[in-house]
Image (tube, helix red, strand yellow):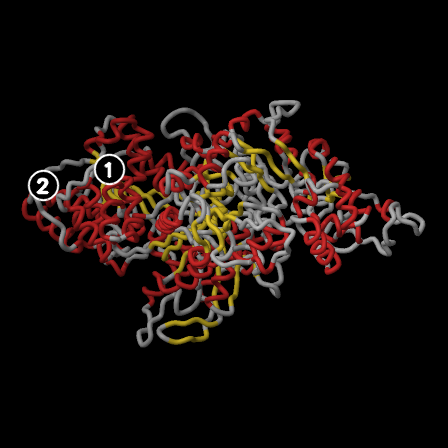
Amino acid sequence: MACSRDLELPNLAYWSRRKGISLLGTGDFTHPAWFAHLQENLVAAEPGLFVLGSSIEHRLPSSLPREPTRFMLSVEISTIYKRDDRTRKVHHLIYMPDFESAARFRESLLRAGCNLSSDGRPIIGLDSRDLLEITLEASADAFLVPAHIWTPWFSALGSKSGFDAIAHCYADLAEHIKAVETGLSSDPEMNQRVSSLDAYQLVSNSDAHSPQALAREATAFTCELDYFAVRAALATGVGLAGTIEFFPEEGKYHGDGHRDCGINWTPAQTREANGICSVCGRPVTVGVLARVEDLADRAQPVSSGKSVTHLIQLHEVLGEIEGVGPKSKTVEGKVNALVAALGPELDILTSVPISEVAAAGGELLAEGVRRLRAGKVTRVPGYDGEYGVIRLFEPDELHVGGDTLFDVPVVEKVVPPKRTVARKVTAPRKPVSAPPLPTAASPHEPFEPMLAGMEEVGTGLLDRLDAMQRVAASAPGGPLLIVAGPGTGKTRTLTHRVAYLCAEMNVYPEQCLAITFTRRAAEELRHRLGGLLGPVAKDVTVSTFHALALSLIREREPGFEVTDLDELMPKAVALLRDQGMEKRWPWVFVDEYQDVDPYQYELLRLLVPPDGNICAIGDPDQAIYSFRGADVQFFLRFSHDFTDARVVRLTRNYRSSAPIIAAAVQAIAPASLVPGRRLDPAKVDLEAPLIGRYTAASAADEAAFIAKKIDELVGGTSHRTKADVRGMTGASLSFGDIAVLYRTDAQAAAIVEALSRASIPVQKRSHDRLRDRSSVKAVVAELRLDNGLTGSISARLKATAQKLEQWEAADLLMPLAQRCGNDLERFLADVSTGAEVDALDPRAEAVTLLTLHAAKGLEFPVVFLAGCEDGLLPMRFPGRPPSEEDLAEERRLFFVGLTRAQRRLFISHSVRRMTFGGERDARPTPFLINIDSGLLDELGESSPRRPRDQQLRLL
């Protein structure tokens, strides 16, 4: 729990009694250690509520009620995910009626890949709607309340990462939301200007980072004291009396401004300045008041009739009077005396007669409480993470000419509370600590990132291709080789060629065969062809090599089952060689031609005559699968194998920034298999960030750097993180936009540990075959049986995994199952012929961890390339020096890793690493030598930055 060590159950019970709280949330019941602590120390009381098993009466003064504090199982969860091309960050309060329901909820989150063991509130990559679904599945009596709904970065209606309505946030399940939490920076009156919130009860709570901070805000009930009565009151409003509130101006996100620049503005001032800070020139943080005004459809609030009480905590009132900090010993002693004399703190502030307050605490305290109850306070709004100032007295009231206003001892020194001092700054200071407000996305921007920079010159099928893509797509029949560098629109060009031939050149779709290597790539081809050709696209045969071989075998041997994947291609080739085959597909298209192995090559030669209509596309500088038998020489000899072959080169890169492209071309140059290798950026941004290079002390240090930088890139998983949004103009990042790549699977352990410790969700995949996993074999074997299961493959997979307790296999296979609908045979075939990376879920809001081999064909806005050391990249095995061809392929692997990045790239290496059973000194990969140092931004405290003019000359 992100709080004081003092917040254990006995202390919570003690302080809640002192404050006057009857019902308290438990805090994070999803954390395994805290969940165990709750189970050990709480006993059942009224339905759905618990009390502390041990007595604390001996710690309490006799003035306090004897009724023990009740606890309700609760947790606050932060979700960070992408929806509608925007990163969303929303906090939710979740309540459970019993430990069994809480356990089911925890298990569902764990199966979804959520990390629940790190300190701090859980941070997960689920959509808010999906989190609500999991809540309701755990128990029909569970409920979810959107937390502090107006906070700029972490709320359902926040200006930075929220929605314009609660219903939008929770989509089709929005009807299950009955109440919303107003948060510290707003109060019910502000919320009642927004008519869409009339459907919800308004509640107030406050997370307690220390015991003394309990009841900063609270909700008052008149219903029975049990879980189900509270839940009913939140659903209907009957039994919900009202709320105890902060003065909203005291909340640290009430107003607009920049904390680091000392700018504290009203919404009108922000609008007048067009939202730009007058000190640093960056967008200011737009606060809660401005956001409420944006969404308000009423000039005046419409009251619900519930009571609203604004308070300042008792120790803060005394701190102002005494001129000392609210946590000082002086204040602590006076609060203890007042509680012993008058009872709970909330009663002192709200209901104890003023005369009794004066008798116990003096006339000055009595006057302060009287003003507080009347709302007569001075308010300086909080802004951009800085708490506001709420004062009961003006300084000259506390001490005037040596005499106080009231008959109390003289206050010798006036020191305003430390945390509420408003700073005035007249010169720029350090960079702002929050991300700037992103510009609105243009409706004219193309849907696919690789299309950026293309001009829409017409409405024809090929009009949105660039010149060389158009040449390749519209080439006449016969052999065609397209050399497509990374990010040059390979798949786009291939699918447009198929569509052009079918739509413009009278080629029948059923005459076309498109072959690729992975299920993921085949699905992408089908999807794009569907968008170009409509319903007739289904007549184009799109297949992987292994799936094609299996279908050809089953045509000749019905009922054939896969026992060894490696036997598929040789068997298919042997059958075709012996039995022959009619020319079913006069037009053949091959993706990633540089990766074909001898059997795949022979299959193509059997399908296509030397002068046939074959279109092969790929890049020999991305040939990285020789360990699987792939031979790049087949690509290089294409013009010798096929008569009068045409060759078209695609060199315009639409994926990566200019520094990334320049570094990649320099890195591959010494071993390039493409004469005159070039890649041209489609758009040069002179402000594009350089490639970050980090030299780590150890693998653990490297992993910690990656975790910290990811936290900064997503704009922070907490309010305290300094954001790094360079290169992200007009866009925002979520965890799903980030990948960490490495040479060997063994490198992943330290990275997974660091990310988990930082509460960053992760999905990890390799290029290993799915069917080689024992858990996958068990699930597939069960699914093959006629066990009476019906419904979608996803539902059957869940049921089978539950029966076998093979949740890891279910999580791995679920993306494939969802793509297969109700087609069991297709699902089983996909598992038999697919790799782990085929089961990668591109929608998952988690950082993707991949081996470099598994990353081929993927792209991410941000890429971390870890372990760039000699011995790992290039790989060197003890006693077996690599050959020149081995080193050349390792360089190509480095080239592939670099070119997976779209906007940000970070390269890291360690000076020491555990390899082959021992810790050894390590040197940076020699492949870095070829990259001009001006393209690299040396990261670390002692690393100098490159002068900007040199960077521009390099680009």
Q: Nearer the viewer, residue 903 or 6?
A: 6
State which tag comes first along the sequence, 2 or 1.
2
Q: Tell me the residue that label 2 is attached to.
A: 555
Q: Residues within 10 Å of mark 1 (few under 14, many from 20)?
A: some
Q: CA distance from mark 2 to mark 1?
A: 27 Å
Q: Say left or right for 100 vs 790.
A: right
- The answer, for residue 389, to whether it is visible in the render is yes
State the residue at coordinates (69%, 45%).
348
Rendering coords of residue 955 (x, y %): 55, 50
The answer to which quarter of the image holds residue 608 is: top left
Q: Nearer the viewer, mark 2 or mark 1?
A: 1
Q: Say left or right for 521 vs 210.
A: left
In contact (CB < 8 Å): disc 2 and disc 1: no
State the residue at coordinates (34%, 56%).
853
Q: Amino acid at mark 2?
A: Glu
- The answer, for residue 722, to whether it is visible in the render is no
Label 1 secondary element: loop
Label 2 secondary element: helix
Number of the label disc, if any, that sits on residue 825? none
Rendering coords of residue 2 (x, y %): 54, 55
Q: Amino acid at mark 1?
A: Ser
Q: Tell me the residue that label 1 is attached to.
A: 792
Q: Residues within 10 Å of mark 2 (few under 14, many from 20)?
A: few
Rendering coords of residue 689 (x, y %): 56, 50
Q: Nearer the viewer, residue 859 or 279?
A: 279
Q: Nearer the viewer, residue 228 or 439?
A: 228
